[in-house]
């Protein structure tokens, strides 16, 4: 009986935008802001497109609302990503080593900063710092698997 095999590899498309701000810290921060901000805006665009298809019509008011929502989400998540990348880079420079602990420190600091900017409940800030550190560390460990 004849047998066949399929061989291949899947890879995600790679999009690189080089922004030279004159310092690696600024370069990484702006890069993180732009990439994650674009992902957040695309997510909102997809959700809003679904709602338009579901409703069956689009108006100028709905379009403007969708555009404002895309900008707001893109700016918010881009800012969070920029802060995280900056904190991780700072931890790497201060510690003098590149490992998973930088992700944990960067995530914890980012969680605390973002939480402190939006509320002043100390327990919530601590919990968000713990969550940020845990998520960043998990993401770093998952990067090692791939």
Image (spheres, grey):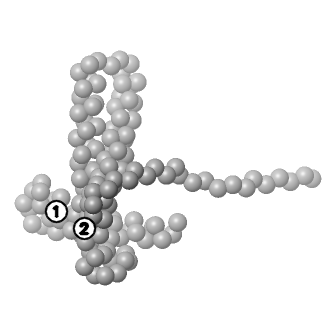
Residue 62 position within the rendered picture, expressed as x and y whole percent measured from the top left: 26, 24
Q: x%, y% of residue 23? A: 27, 64
Q: Earlier in the sequence, mark 1 or mark 2?
A: 2
Which element carries disc 1, helix, strand or loop? helix
> Who is closer to the viewer here, 23 or 103?
23
Residue beneath disc 1: 113
Q: Is residue 135 above or below residue 30?
A: below
* Quadrant in which residue 11 is drawn: bottom right
Q: Looking at this rendering, what residue extends furthest in the front direction?
A: 22
Q: Residue at x 8, y 62 (%)?
A: 121
Residue 136 visible: yes
The answer to whether 116 appears left or right of 14 in the picture is: left
| CB under 8 Å between discs 1 and 2 | yes
How packed is label 1: few (under 14 Cα within 10 Å), some, or many (20 or more)?
A: some
| Location of residue 65 in the rendering, given as x and y in whole percent from the top left corner | 24, 29
Number of numbered discs: 2
Tell me, yes or no, if residue 81 can be seen here: no
Indicate the secondary structure of the residue bearing disc 2.
Answer: helix
Vertical side of 14 occupied by 59: above or below: above
Residue 33 or 105: which is nearer the viewer?
A: 33
Label placed on residue 50: none
Distance from the alpha carbon under mark 1 to that under mark 2: 10 Å
Viewer-proximal residue, 27 or 84? 27
Residue occupying the point 12% across, 61% down:
116
- Residue 60: quadrant of the picture: top left
Residue, disc 2: 87
Label 2 neighbour load within 10 Å: few <14, some 14-19, many 20+: many
């Amino acid at each position: 009986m004849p047998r066949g095999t399929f061989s291949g590899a899947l890879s995600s498309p790679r999009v690189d935008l080089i922004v030279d701000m004159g310092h690696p810290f600024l370069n990484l921060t702006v890069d993180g802001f732009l990439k994650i901000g674009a992902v957040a805006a695309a997510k909102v665009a997809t959700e809003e497109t679904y709602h338009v298809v579901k409703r069956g019509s689009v108006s100028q008011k709905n379009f403007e609302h969708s555009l404002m929502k895309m900008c707001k989400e893109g700016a918010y998540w881009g800012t969070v990503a920029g802060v995280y990348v900056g904190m991780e880079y700072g931890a790497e420079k201060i510690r003098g080593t590149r490992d998973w602990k930088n992700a944990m420190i960067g995530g914890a600091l980012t969680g605390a900063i973002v939480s402190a900017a939006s509320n002043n409940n100390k327990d919530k800030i601590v919990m968000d710092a713990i969550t940020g550190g845990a998520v960043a560390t998990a993401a770093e460990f998952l990067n090692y698997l791939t």
